[in-house]
Image (cartoon, grey):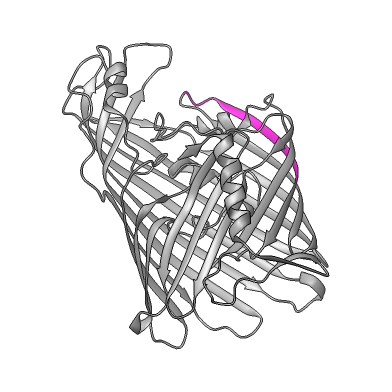
Amino acid sequence: MAMTRSAFSFVFVVLAAVTPFAYGEEGYVHQAGDGSGVPVFELVLDGFFYHDNQHGGGAELIEEAAGILHGVHGHEHEHGASNGLNLGESEIALTADLPGQLKGRLSLALSTEAVELEEAWLQTQALPGGLALKAGRFLSDIGYLNGQHPHQQEFAGGNLVYGALLGAHGLIDAGVQLTWEAPVPFYLQLGVETLQGHEQERFGALIEAEDADDIVLSGAGLSLPRSGPRSGTFFLKAAPYLGERHSLQAGVSYAHARQYQQVINEDAAIVDDQFALEGRQQLSGLELVYEYDADGEQGKGDWKLAAEYLQLKKAMRVTGADTTAPVQIGDTVNGTQDGLYVQGMYGIAPRLQLGLRYEVSGMLNELDEAGSIRTFDASVRTSLAVTFRPNPATRLRLQLSSASVSDEAGVKTQLNAFVLGYTGMFGGHEGHAH
C-alpha cells in the first residue's frame, strides 16, 4: 500500500509528535517503553554503494531466473539497485506495550518512490496456557528468515531462495496467528496462521482477470478471487537447552494457498503461446540455527550458523490458452521447485564479523504440462561479507557475491556484485525474535 511523498511527510510529523524523547549522554533516548502504552519510536536508515557486471541489472536478472513461478508478479516492486550510490529501504515504526495485556506495532517501509505499510498488528500477552494471539498485517513466522526485516538480515540483497519462491518481501499478509508455548523444560512453540491471501508477490498470487484476458486470447481466463482467507500456515520451533554458551533451534514449516493464479509465456519471441493457470500451492520448509557465545570482547570468537531448505509444489489447471500454446483448456500443470541456503557468521575481532553464504535455487525445478516435462537449471550464488559495528546501533558492511543465474533456455549468466553500505538504527528498536 503506497502513499505519496506528501503523505510521508505527514506520517513522519505525526510519529514524531506522539513519541516523547529525552536527550542523554549518547544522544536522543526514549522515555517510553515502561509499559504505559506510550509508543516507542524506531528509525532505520539505510544506504549503499552498489556495482555489478550487468550494468546495474543484477536484481532484474535474478528475478527472471528460470523457475515454475515465472510470470508471477503480484505487484510491480522496484528492488533493483543501480550502479553507484543508492538509498536502501529505510523504516519508521511505533511499538507500544501494555504488560499483561497487549502489544502493538506499526511499521512503514520508506523508499524514494513511496511509503509502504509493512506491519500493523496487535498481540495478546496474557492468555492462559502459553497461548498468544496476533491479528493484523504481519510477517509470517514460517521459516527462519521470513520474519526478519531487511535491516535485521546478515547479508545484503535478500535471499535467492526466498525471492524465487515467496518474492522479495517474503510471506507478509493480513491475518490471525495463534501460537502455543508448550510447558516442557525446553523451548517448544507451535503456531498456526490464517491469512487473507492477498497482494502476494509469488505465493498465493492472484492476477487481475482483465489483465489475464488481455494476455490470453482464448478461453475463460481466470476466475474472480474467492472469499478470504485463502492461505494458511503451520510451524513448529524447538530449542533444547545446551548450556550457557550454546544454542540450537530447529523448525519445520508448512504453508498452503487454496487459490493461486499464473500466466505462463513459453517463448518470449512468440506472441500468442501463453496460457493461464489456476490452482493451489503448498510450501514446506526445514530450518536449523546454531549459535556459540565465546564470551569474547564485543563478539570476538562468536559463531552463528543457519541453514534452511524450502520446497514449493503447485497443482494447476489451464483456464485459458492462446492459439499456439502447448496446452489446452482443462489440462493439468504441476510443478516442483526447491531451494537451500547455508550461511555462517564469525567474530574475527571485537565488533567485526566475517560472513559466508551459499545459496542454490532450483535443485528440483520441473514443470509437468499435461504430461510434457520441462526442467530448468538451478541458479547458484556465493557471498562473502565483512561487517563492522562501531556501536550496537550502527552497521557498516562490505559484501562481494558471485552468482550463476539460469534462464528458461538454459543459458547461464555470471553475475558479480559489490556492495558497501551502512545501516543506522535509532530509538527502541527490537531484536529479531528467533
Q: On screen, 132 above or below 106?
A: below
Q: On screen, 158 above or below 33?
A: above
The image shows residue 379 at horizontal and vertical percentages of 54, 38
The image shows residue 117 at horizontal and vertical percentages of 49, 47
Task: Specify whether 267 is left or right of 33.
Answer: left
Quadrant where the image shows the N terminus? top left
Task: Specify whether 411 is left or right of 316.
Answer: right
Q: Residue placed at 58% from the left, 59% from the top?
A: 18
The image shows residue 328 at horizontal and vertical percentages of 19, 22
Q: Which residue lies furthest to the front in this view?
A: 17
Residue 167 visible in the displayed image: yes
Does the stretch in magenta take in 77? no
Q: Residue placed at 42% from the left, 77% from the top?
A: 101
Q: Could you say which is closer to the camera, residue 183 or residue 424? A: 424
Q: Could you say which is closer to the camera, residue 265 or residue 200? A: 200
Task: Specify whether 244 is left or right of 298.
Answer: left
Task: Specify whether 79 is left or right of 207.
Answer: right
Residue 154 visible in the displayed image: no
The image shows residue 206 at horizontal and vertical percentages of 32, 36
Which image quadrant is residue 388 in? bottom right
Taken as a whole, is the magenta stretch helix, strand or loop?
strand
Q: What stretch is highlighted in magenta?
A: 409-421
Which image quadrant is residue 266 in? top left
